[in-house]
Image (cartoon, rainbow, N blue to C red):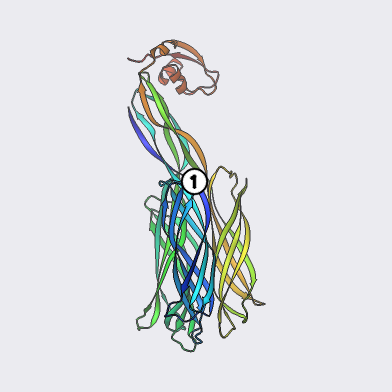
Amino acid sequence: MEFNKKDFYGIASKDRKQVQITIDQDCNVPDTKPDVEKMIQTKGTVLIQETEMMVDRIRMKGEFRFQGLYGTNDPRTFLESLEYSLPFEEYIHMDGVVPADYVKVTYTIDDINTVLINSRKLSIRVLLSFILQVNEEMKEEAIVDIYDEGVSTLKKEIQVTDLIVNKKDVARLKEELVLPANKSNIYQILWSQVDIENLQGKLGDHAIEIQGVMHVFLLYLGEDEQVPVQYARWEVPIHTETECYECAPGMVGRIGLTLGSQQMEVRPDADGEERLISLDVTLECDIKIYEDQTLSYVDDGYTTRSRLVPEYEMFDFETLIGKNQAIMKAVKNFPIKQEPGKLLQVLTVKGSCSVDEVEVTEEGLKVEGVWMADVLFLSTEDQMPVMSDSYIEPFSFFVEAKGLTGEDDYQLDVRLDQMTGVPTEGNEIEIKAAIVFDFISFRKKRQRVMVDMKEEPLDYEAIQKIPGIIGYIVKEGDSLWSIAKNYFTAIESIREQNEDVEEVSPGDRLLIVKEMGRR
């Protein structure tokens, strides 16, 4: 017997775990750097180099790239920066995971704490939270057609949301920035910050179009002896794309875009002056593309020449039930805690957010967490005119998703966008931010699918017990196909004996003539 088989694919959420790790390391100030008087601002990024799936555990290896801006004992420049790479390796226990699974890892930086041991040595303690989402890829080869004229098949259809693309990619942004005319030439970069807002990925023809706005801030030592420390800002529109041959408009895309590595290099312009900045930024793309489809497959079959024995496996199909993006606007006034000195100007604001709890209700998701802001600003203090402060604020928000149950599979990504800070009266700063909630949910449909069918000899004794001709009253749940199979005949035969009937209803009367199979 010849079959046509099709691979059915699916992804099932297997387990989810949140862990915290602490990196604690003492670091020496390089000999080429001046003494540390005061740490002004710190930041860092996590680079995950390896995730190895093992039996009941996951090995995660990477490094935390620390950057610090500090005040020096040099009255002319008063600022310098440090960079360190802090490696880590963790084994995370998760029951049931196997090497064939794959994991998505996201992280938040909960705290960066620095303590000066002395002016040439500091202790760095970093607290990181990781969320590990383990998924299991399902695959089943099922029968969708049987190529045999003597076999009558029963087909079923199911409406599903099929995962067409599931991959990771990297989009690269390269820009050449020109220093404003009123700024002095660059001698040394002290501090930089790259933020991207309104970042979106849209499905195009065989490509994913990426749009947004990139904000670049640069604090540097210039060649002007009167004003050695200077800063500059740029706003750069983003319009790029990454190839994706399988996608097309009309499909449902879930494109996760995360700011990755950032590299800056100062280059001379046409006059030989250090006024050009080459910026190379990567965007890490987590691409999932879905398409609503109607899948048709063989659920049963019979023939009058042999006994057919089907073999089934259960498979979890998924149907998209909700996709939503909600935005919460946050506005908060914070007092400047740094003394002495008064706030003159906000240089830059960077922020992050973390989710503490998600509650599933009939109307949607209740999300609670905190958002954080680090502010770099100019003050009236002569000895240390560049200062920083940090703030934390709780939030509670409701993401509408009607009909969601605890059995449904959902994914929620929360990020901070469009953060700004402006001075207000009373030595305060007003911080505005948008908290973006990206939500998608699926409902599982567990169905049996036929993976094989074997032929066995007919049971002639059982067949002989079936009357050659019978009058039959249709019962609830009957169909022409099921009646023909039970009484060892063909649908066409029933139609011939009953005025070409197409459909049957409970109570209908049929004349059925048995057909005898060949030995």
Query: What residue lies at 41% left-to-right and 49% top-to-bottom?
Result: 165
Query: What residue lies at 57% left-to-right and 63% top-to-bottom?
Result: 434
Camera-side residue of 55 and 11: 55
Amino acid at pointer 1: Asp
Query: What residue lies at 59% left-to-right and 56% top-to-bottom?
Result: 356
Q: Is residue 193 visible?
A: no
| Mark 1: few/some/many CA within 10 Å (<14, 14-19, 20+) | few
- Dividing the picture into quarters, in which one does residue 519 lie? top left
Residue 288: % across, % down: 44, 51
Q: Is residue 489 above or below residue 330?
A: above
Q: Is residue 510 visible?
A: yes
Position of the N terminus, as image quadrant, is top left
Camera-side residue of 270 and 366: 366
Residue 261: % across, % down: 42, 65
Q: Which residue is mark 1?
A: 95
Query: What residue lies at 54% left-to-right and 73% top-to-bottom?
Result: 115
